[in-house]
């Protein structure tokens, strides 16, 4: 990753955290830190990673993208290219 004072160092993390806060954290009041922590985990593992569409992946979910990618690799292996 970048060097000292590189503006692109934290771009990915900052974008992810901004999205997480907008979609989850700021949507309601959280009665306890533990409840928020648990909900953040389930949001990331249950929605963000497998089902949320990502523009960088052609507006498909990571699960769908991996299936398409795996199928393309399998097609290449089967055809012998």
Image: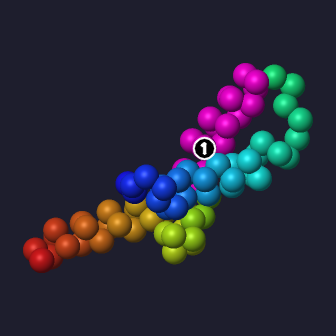
Residue 71 % position (x, y): 32, 67
Q: Is residue 2 above or below residue 33?
A: below
Which residue is identified by label 1?
Answer: 44
Name the residue at 47% across, 59% down: 6
Q: Is residue 56 above or below residue 34?
A: below
Look at the image and tell me in which quarter the C terminus lies: bottom left
Locate residue 74: give its quadrant: bottom left
* Secondary structure mostly taken by the magenta-highlighted segment of the chain: helix
Name the residue at 61% across, 53% down: 14
Locate residue 25: give its quadrant: top right
Residue 21 % position (x, y): 74, 47
- What secondary structure is marked by label 1? helix
Identify the magenta region.
33-51
Query: From this viewpoint, is residue 63 visible?
Result: no
Q: Is residue 25 magenta?
A: no
Name the residue at 51% across, 74% down: 58
Q: Nearer the viewer, residue 9 or 73?
A: 9
Locate residue 34: give its quadrant: top right
- Please tell me how crowded label 1 is: few (under 14), some (14-19), or many (20+) other residues with Cα within 10 Å: some
Horizontal relation, residue 30 to residue 76: left or right: right
Q: Nearer the viewer, residue 70 or 34?
A: 34
């Amino acid at each position: 990753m970048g060097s000292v004072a590189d503006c692109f160092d934290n771009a990915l993390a900052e974008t992810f955290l901004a999205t997480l806060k907008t979609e989850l954290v700021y949507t309601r009041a959280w009665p306890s830190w533990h409840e928020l922590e648990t909900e953040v985990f389930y949001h990331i593992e249950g929605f963000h990673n497998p089902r949320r569409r990502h523009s960088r992946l052609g507006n498909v979910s990571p699960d769908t993208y991996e299936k398409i990618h795996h199928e393309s690799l399998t097609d290449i292996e089967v055809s012998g290219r």
